[in-house]
Image (cartoon, rainbow, N blue to C red):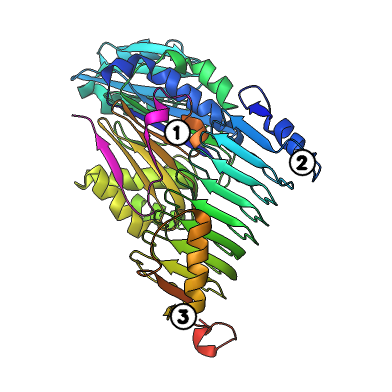
Amino acid sequence: MPVVDLATVSIRDLNRALHNLPENTNETGWTICNPGGRHSIAAGVDAPIDIEIDGHVGYYCAGMNKHAEITINGNAGVGLAENMMSGIVRVKGDASQAAGATGQGGLLVIEGNASARCGISMKGIEIVVKGSIGPMSAFMAQAGSLVVLGDAGEALGDSIYEARLFVRGEVKSLGSDCEEKVIGDEERTILSGLLGRAGIDVSVDGFRLYGSARRLYHFHIDNAY
Amino acid sequence: MCGIVGLFLKDRALESRLGSMLGGMLEVMTDRGPDSTGFAIYGPGTESGFKITVRGKNLGGLADALSKALGVAVGSVTRDTHLVLSLPRHAADKARDWLAAERPDVAVTGGGRRIELYKEVGLPKQVVSRFGLEQMAGTHGIGHTRMATESAVTTAGAHPFSAGADQCLVHNGSLSNHRTVRRNLEREGLSFTTDNDSEVAAGYLTWRMQEGDSLSKALESSLETLDGFYTFVVGTETGFAVLRDPIACKPAVMAETDRYVAFGTEYRALVGLPGIENARLFEPEPARVYAWERH
C-alpha cells in the first residue's frame, strides 16, 4: 500500500500518481504523511480507493473527488472537497471556509466545526457537520442536504434555491428567502440515513429543517433596489 | 492576495528566536505576495530612548549630522537600505522635523520606543536575508508579503504602515472608501506619504488611539468607518491585535499556545513554529476584535 511523504514528494507528483490510477487498481489504500498545510492534496481523484492523510491540509483538498474515500486526520483549509462528485471525504478536525462548495454528490463529514460559507452553492452534495458552521453557509444552495449538530452562523441559506438544511442547535439568523419547514417522514428518513452513513448516533428528534421559501424564483419588483 | 504573518510571544525564552520564526513564516507566504516584503519588530528599548527607522540612499553620516544639529547623542545601526537611529525620546519630534527639512530624500518608515520597521521590493527570502531578520530578537512582530492591487509596486507601497509611535498595521484586502477616510483624517491633521489604502487604515487607527481609544476600541470603530475587505494585524508597543471584515473575505488562521500567539493568512505559514502540533488552532471570526496585551 503506497505511503507518500510530502516532506520529500511534491504535490504535483502525488496527484499525478493518483490521477493515473486505473479504475480497477490494486493500490487501493494510500497514506499521505507530512501534509504541512499544503494546497490541493488529493484533488481530482477518480478511482475507488481509500486515502488517509495524517495531518493538516491546505486549500482545495479532495476537490472534485470522484469515487475515493478520503480521510484527513487533522484540519482542512479553504474549499475542502469543493465540487465533489461522489465518494466520501471525512475530516477529523475543523474545516475552513467554503467546505463542500458547489459539490454535486458524495458525502462530506466534518467532525469538528466548519467556518463561513459551508456548502455554498451546493448542488447535490451531502454534508454532515458534527460541530457548528459559520456565517453565510448554504448560500445559494441548489440541491443536497446539510446536517449540522451544533449551531449555524448568520444568514443561513441566503438566496437558497433548494436543499435541505437540518440544524440541531441554534441558528443565528436565516438569510433571504430561507425559512423553517415542517419535518415530514421523508425528511426524517433522509436525515437518519445521513447520520447513519456519517457514523453519528444521535436521534433525529431535535433537528429543525430549513429550506427555500421560493419567493426569489421569479423577478418581483419589490425585490429590486 | 497578499500574505500576512504575526507572532506575539508569551514566553520570554523565545524572544531571541522571534526574527527567525517570523522570517520562516514570511518565506512560506511568497506565493501570496512576491512583489515586496516588510516587517516590524518590537525589540529592546529603553524608557528614555526613541528609535527612528529610515530608508533611503546615502545614509552614512546621517546620524552624525542629526546629532550635531540637535546637540544630542544619536546611535545608528545600518541594515541594507535602512538605518535605525537611536536618540533621546525628548528629541524625537525635532529629529523628525530635521529629517523632513534637511533630508527629504529619506523616508521614515516608523518610530517609537521599540519598533523597527523594514520594507523592500523583492521576494520574501531575499528581503528577510538583506535585513538580517533571522538574527533579530523581540517580543512581537508582524510581517507582510505584498501582491499589489490598489497602488504601485514600490518600496513606499510595501507594508507594514506606521502612522504613530510604536504602531503599525499590515493589511490583506482592499478598502473601497479610503479616499474619503483619507480626506477626513487630513482635516484632523494627519498626513500621508503614499496613495496606499492600507496607509489610511493605519492612520485611522492611530487617530482613534490619539483620541483616547484603546487598540481594541479603535479596531471596533474601524468596522463602522472602513469599507471594503480586509484582514488587519496590528502591533503597538505592548499589544497585538487582529480584525477581519464582517464577511471575512480574506483568509486567516491563528494558533495559540502557552508560549505564543501566531497569525497566518494560511496555516502553511505556521507549520514551522515550535509546538504547533498541540496549539489551539482557530479562524478569527468576522467583525470580531482579537487583542493580546503584554504586561
Rendered location of residue B14, percent (x, y): 33, 18
Query: How many numbered tags mark residues here?
Result: 3
Q: Secondary structure at mark 3?
A: loop
Quarter of the rendering containing residue A149: bottom left
Residue at image position (48%, 39%) is B265
- Are callouts 1 and 2 both on one chain? no
**1 vs 3, front mark:** 3
Question: Is B268 colored magenta in this rendering?
Answer: no
| Region rendered in magenta | B272-295
The kind of residue tagged 2 is His
Q: Is residue B114 above or below residue B146?
A: above
Q: Determine the chain carrying the residue at label 2.
A: A
Q: Are marks 1 and 3 in contact (CB under 8 Å)?
A: no
Residue closest to the eye, B92 or A92: A92
Query: Pointers 2 and 3 in contact (CB under 8 A)?
Result: no
Frontmost of labels 1 and 2 is 2
Q: Which residue is mark 1?
A: B5
- Classed neighbour count for the residue bearing mark 1: other residues with Cα under 10 Å, few (<14), some (14–19), many (≥20): many
User: How far across and how far down the image is residue B116, in percent?
Assistant: 37, 23
Residue underneath mark 2: A19
Residue under label 3, please give it: A184
